[in-house]
Image (cartoon, grey):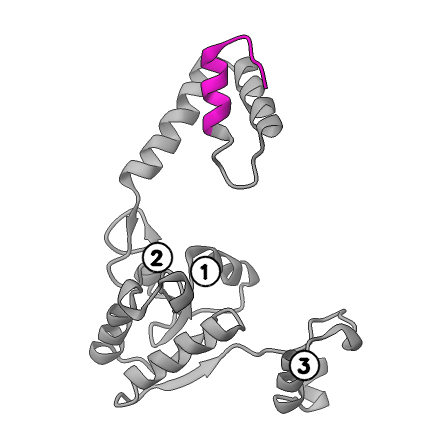
């Protein structure tokens, strides 16, 4: 892509580093910024830089935070005795958007995947074990990806906390609402049958 300005070309190159942003989309975004008031563009840049510079990770749950403790952990209205274990921050946002969970979270920062060189020591598993050991935790809810890596991570953590008194559950897995049964994979179908629900509970 031949551009008439080196400054423009450099800006496009930076935008195109973002996931899902190609050269054409990056150029469209840069040209849009060129039409904006220079103060608005400066505010945009300063906001991104400040976010990257000042954002922290909660010392309790490893979620993103403006301070040492995130807003979820600091919220006394939430059930502090239930911890939902997730892979990353996007999962926290996804679950929060349902407005169906009122406990706290623990962000592992990934899942165990030997093929990708990710082992237990690279995740915040010890921080989680420390929470369960020193806090009054009634239930640990695993909300990890339903695959081999996710199940391996659950198994490892279960073994790690086997000596602690804590109920361990996982989110339900099964056929998606609106999905066609014939297109479901065997593992999903098997889990759906094994974890079947009473009709009265299902239709409510």
Taking 142 as reference, is 21 left or right?
right
The magenta region covers 1-14
Residue 113 shows in this picture: no
Q: In front: 17, or 126?
A: 17
Residue 22 against residue 153 in the figure, above or below: above
Which quarter shows the C terminus?
Answer: bottom right
Residue 186, numbered label = 3
**Counting other residues with Cα less than 10 Å from the Cα at mark 3, is it few (<14), some (14-19), or many (20 or more)?**
few
Magenta-span inclusion, residue 34? no
**Disc 1 vs disc 2: Cβ atoms closer than 8 Å?**
yes
Taking 122 as reference, is 92 left or right?
right
Which quarter shows the N terminus?
Answer: top right
| CA distance for labels 3 and 1 | 28 Å
Residue 22 against residue 185 in the figure, above or below: above
Of callouts 1 and 2, the N-terminal one: 2
Secondary structure state at the residue bearing disc 3 = helix
């Amino acid at each position: 892509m031949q551009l008439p300005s080196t400054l423009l070309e450099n800006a496009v190159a930076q935008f195109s580093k973002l996931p899902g942003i190609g050269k054409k989309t990056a150029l469209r975004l840069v040209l849009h910024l060129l039409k904006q008031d220079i103060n608005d563009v400066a505010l945009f840049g300063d906001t991104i830089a400040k976010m990257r510079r000042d954002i922290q990770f909660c010392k309790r749950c490893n979620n993103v935070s403006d301070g040492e403790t995130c807003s979820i952990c600091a919220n006394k209205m939430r059930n502090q005795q239930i911890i939902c274990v997730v892979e990353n921050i996007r999962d926290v946002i996804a679950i929060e958007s349902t407005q169906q969970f009122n406990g706290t979270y623990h962000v592992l920062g990934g899942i165990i995947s030997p093929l990708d060189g990710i082992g237990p020591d690279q995740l915040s598993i010890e921080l989680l074990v420390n929470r369960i050991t020193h806090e009054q935790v009634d239930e640990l809810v695993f909300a990890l990806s339903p695959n081999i890596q996710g199940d391996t991570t659950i198994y490892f953590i279960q073994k790690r906390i086997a000596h602690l008194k804590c109920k361990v559950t996982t989110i339900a897995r099964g056929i998606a609402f609106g999905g066609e049964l014939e297109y479901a994979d065997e593992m999903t179908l098997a889990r759906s049958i094994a974890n079947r629900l009473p009709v009265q509970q299902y239709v409510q």
